[in-house]
Image: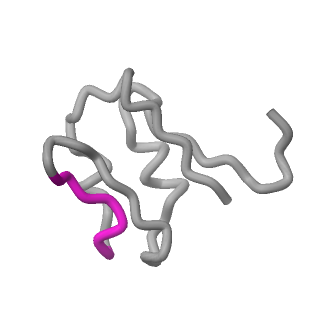
Amino acid sequence: MEIVYDEKICVKCLACVSESESGGVTYEDERIKFDKTCPEDWRNIAEICPVGAIAIKDSDEVI
């Protein structure tokens, strides 16, 4: 699983940070940061993004 984040379309609404239960998504130095080692519901975090700036790509997907 890979987290794909497009900072260019992110509006920094911080919904992903609010949805993060284990600190996997934080807002530091005016940037959204991801820590994949944290046990999060990553698909839910991606789905909550209102502009689609976060996506989850499974390792077997081909771009």
Q: Which residue ends up furthest to the front in the rendered image?
A: 29
Residue placed most toward the observer, 11 or 31 = 31
Q: Quadrant of the N terminus?
A: bottom right
Up-down relation of residue 35 to residue 12 (above or below): below
Q: Where is residue 10? Give x, y as percent.
A: 33, 29
Left or right, 35 with respect to 33, comes to: right
The residue lying at 32 percent from left, 75 percent from top is 22
Using residue 52 as the reference point, say whether residue 31 is left or right of it: left
Instruction: Determine if the magenta segment contains residue 23.
Output: yes
Q: What stretch of residues is rendered in magenta? A: 22-28
Q: Quadrant of residue 25?
A: bottom left
- Residue 7 location (% of width, % of height): 37, 31
Where's residue 21, x and y in %? 30, 71
Q: At 37% from the left edge and 22% from the top edge, which residue is drawn?
A: 8
Is 14 included in the stretch rendered in magenta? Answer: no
Residue with the most extreme left position = 29
Q: Is residue 26 left or right of residue 54?
A: left
The percent position of residue 38, horizontal first and vertical second, equals 43, 76
